[in-house]
């Protein structure tokens, strides 16, 4: 009896771990192959059968990619756009999140729902009329235009997430600060903000990744001042295979690093700040 | 230090009237307890005093100042919250120093006052720790220290002991009383625990449904409750209430309870005679009932249901007519369940209540 019980237990564990490993492979295998190709010589990408181990390690391909005309400047553009997006969406969105968290007002539920629904709107449909509008406003082909669109895309997300973060900071703490000599703003800056910071940082990094990876609006709204995804997309059809591998790898890296760093804070994103 | 005055305070939340035209005066240096069941409005009143709620009507005075329209920071108060509200991102030292830092005091003064406050609450060893590294009781002491170093005119406490375990609560109760004797601040203390109220308060304001039902010294409330609610709320176990009918004849006034007659004290006889024929409630505390071996004057037949030996006394649950009453007797009293006994009422200790309104009938009207 006991041995069959433990066999059953072992079987279910094997199944569980097997499924987990498969899931991990599903995500990691393509990453590994891309990374492998990005760090092999140009010839290695044309080999068949594909080597699964880095036999031919070289930084040739990456160098080629990085030194291609336009790549480095587009990286700079991407960084600027992402940073502007973070600042704008936090400055505009965090107060909104605070209001949703702390105050009761008419239409509160409608606003929250409205924010979520607005995310459902496909960017593809939005981009072309937006391009027309930007041309009229002299914002076309500027990184500020792209940053504006990215901020609009990130804002609902930031508002809802920061509202969850602020809900996780007990109202008591603000009231205690008020009885100890703070007005509302001082109470916010000295008590709420420090406690919300991990969550806000996670929201900021998430926004960075969204902006960095955003390709559609960036491609349509820029011509010469491209962001990195737009740059890669526009030159994808004319580029050799190894360029694509290198480009792909280069674009994945920031997202990978950031998600690795904020893994721990992802829980806090939904308002679970440990007291 | 300052006195406090609530003048016709009214506070409404949606459809609920949390504070219904409440007026109260608190003397300078007094320890006033706001006591009542959940939802009676005591916390609302405290928060109106703190400035954390806007009153819908009435004025609040601290000392001579009308503070009704002032923000909490301008009222010179200090508050201890039920959840302690200790700042998790600051050390114990910085927590206690928070209010002083907001006032812009010089560094050495802050250091001195924080260390004094910490010593008073036995926190001197924990100044460098963070709240997450402290126990609940220690965090509560941090909250209290943070409030008292402010040396505010008024100290407000919102059920500070309710989140502690029983033993710690006992200790901290004595600590708070000692603290008040040392710092002598005007203190408003909100609680639903009547033992805390009796122990700590110079005066207790018993609240029900947004109104103050009785405000008096603890023993006065204990001995002379204003109505059935107060009598039943204060004291463990609560006051017994037995229904009866007033019978006044031949110049003698008694209350008929079941088959027995209970005579009031001489002082109340004349007031009661005016209620001839009306139903009445006899309120009597468990410790003021005694067991008599035979029928005497002022006794009622009763049957013992349950005997609880509680160490310092025995608590009896009795069937008196259709009512269940509690009687407290000496620990060596010989009594067993199913015993039929006679309960003796001390006429001076009976609190007569109007059966219809529940209000106490007193000779001073």
Image (cartoon, helix red, strand yellow):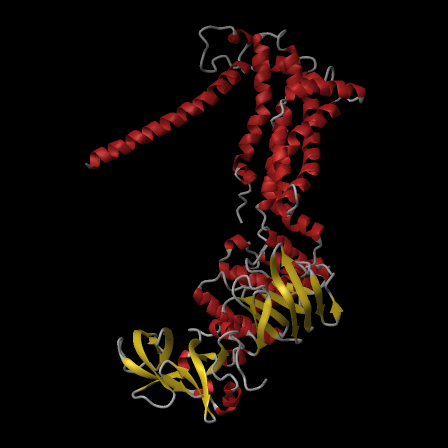
- Residue sitting at 53 percent across and 6 percent down? A43
Percent from the top left, x then y, of residue B80? 59, 62
Q: Work out whether residue B150 or residue B27 is closer to the camera in this orientation and state it.
A: B27
Above or below, B249 relative to B202: below
- Give the farthest residue toward the left: A1
Residue A172 percent across, percent down from the top left: 60, 54
> Which quadrant does the N terminus of chain B fall into?
bottom right
Say above or below: B198 vs B94.
below
Image vertical order of residue B199 relative to residue A39, above or below:
below
Quadrant housing residue B79: bottom right
Q: Quadrant of residue A76?
A: top right
Q: Quadrant of residue B23?
A: bottom right
* Quadrant in which the C terminus of chain B appears: bottom right
- Is B298 left, or right, of B150 in this rendering? left
Labels in figure, total: 0
Residue B343, horizontal then vertical, whole percent? 35, 83
Q: Is residue A141 visible?
A: no
Q: Nearer the viewer, residue A99 or B21?
A: B21
The residue lying at 64 percent from left, 26 percent from top is A211
Q: Position of residue B309 (x, y in %)?
A: 32, 75
Residue ranking furthest to the bottom:
B250
Along the viewing direction, whichever of A54 and B200 lies nearer the viewer: B200
- A243 relative to B186, above or below: above
Res A199 visible: yes
């Amino acid at each position: 009896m006991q041995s069959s019980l433990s066999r059953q237990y072992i079987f279910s564990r094997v199944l569980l771990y097997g499924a987990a490993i498969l899931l991990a492979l599903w995500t990691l295998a393509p990453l590994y192959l891309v990374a492998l190709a990005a760090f092999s010589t140009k010839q290695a990408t044309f080999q068949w059968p594909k080597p699964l181990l880095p036999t031919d390690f070289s930084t040739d391909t990456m160098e080629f990619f990085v030194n291609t005309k336009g790549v480095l400047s587009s990286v700079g553009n991407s960084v600027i756009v992402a940073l502007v997006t973070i600042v704008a969406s936090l400055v505009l969105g965090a107060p909104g999140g605070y209001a949703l968290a702390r105050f009761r007002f008419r239409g509160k539920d409608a606003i929250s729902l409205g924010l979520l629904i607005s995310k459902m709107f496909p960017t593809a449909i939005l981009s072309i009329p937006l391009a027309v509008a930007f041309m009229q406003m002299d914002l076309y082909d500027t990184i500020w235009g792209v940053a504006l669109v990215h901020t609009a895309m990130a804002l609902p997300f930031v508002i809802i997430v920061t509202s969850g973060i602020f809900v996780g900071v007990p109202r008591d703490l603000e009231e205690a600060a008020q009885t100890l000599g703070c007005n509302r703003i001082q109470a916010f800056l000295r008590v709420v903000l420090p406690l919300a910071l991990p969550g806000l940082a996670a929201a900021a990094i998430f926004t960075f990744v969204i902006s960095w990876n955003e390709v559609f609006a960036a491609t349509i709204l820029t011509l010469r001042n491209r962001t990195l995804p737009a740059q890669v997309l526009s030159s994808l059809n004319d580029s050799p295979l190894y360029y694509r591998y290198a480009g792909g790898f280069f674009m994945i890296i920031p997202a990978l690093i950031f998600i690795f760093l904020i893994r721990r804070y992802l829980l806090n994103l939904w308002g679970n700040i440990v007291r | 230090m300052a006195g406090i005055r609530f003048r016709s305070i009214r506070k409404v939340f949606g459809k609920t009237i949390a504070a219904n035209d409440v007026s109260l005066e608190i003397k300078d240096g007094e320890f006033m307890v706001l006591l009542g069941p959940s939802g009676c409005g005591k916390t609302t009143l405290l928060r109106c005093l703190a400035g954390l709620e806007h009153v819908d009507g009435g004025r609040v005075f601290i000392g001579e100042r009308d503070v009704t329209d002032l923000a909490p920071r301008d009222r010179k108060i200090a508050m201890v919250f039920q959840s302690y509200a200790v700042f998790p991102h600051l050390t114990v030292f910085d927590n206690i120093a928070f209010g002083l830092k907001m006032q812009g005091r010089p560094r050495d003064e802050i250091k001195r006052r924080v260390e004094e406050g910490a010593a008073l609450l036995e926190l001197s060893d924990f100044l460098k720790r963070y709240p997450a590294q402290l126990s609940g009781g220690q965090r509560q002491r941090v909250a209290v220290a943070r409030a008292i170093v402010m040396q505010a005119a008024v100290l407000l406490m919102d059920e500070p002991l309710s989140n502690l375990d029983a033993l710690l609560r006992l200790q901290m109760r004595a600590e708070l009383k000692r603290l008040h004797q040392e710092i002598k601040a005007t203190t408003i203390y909100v609680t639903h625990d009547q033992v805390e109220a009796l122990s700590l308060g110079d005066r207790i304001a018993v609240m029900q449904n947004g109104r103050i039902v009785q405000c008096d010294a603890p023993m006065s409330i204990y001995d002379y409750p204003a109505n059935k609610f107060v009598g039943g709320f204060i004291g463990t176990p609560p006051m017994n209430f037995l229904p009866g009918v007033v019978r006044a004849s031949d110049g003698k006034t008694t209350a008929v309870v079941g088959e027995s007659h209970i005579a009031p004290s001489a002082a109340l006889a004349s007031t009661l005679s005016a209620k001839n024929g009306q139903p009445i409630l006899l309120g009597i505390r468990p410790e003021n009932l005694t067991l008599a071996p035979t029928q005497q004057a002022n006794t009622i037949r009763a049957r013992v249901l349950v005997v609880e030996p509680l160490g310092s006394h025995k608590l009896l649950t009795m069937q008196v007519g259709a009512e269940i009453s509690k009687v407290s007797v000496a620990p060596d009293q010989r009594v067993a369940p199913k015993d039929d006994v006679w309960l003796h009422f001390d006429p001076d200790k009976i609190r007569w209540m109007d059966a219809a309104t529940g209000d106490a009938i007193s000779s001073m009207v």
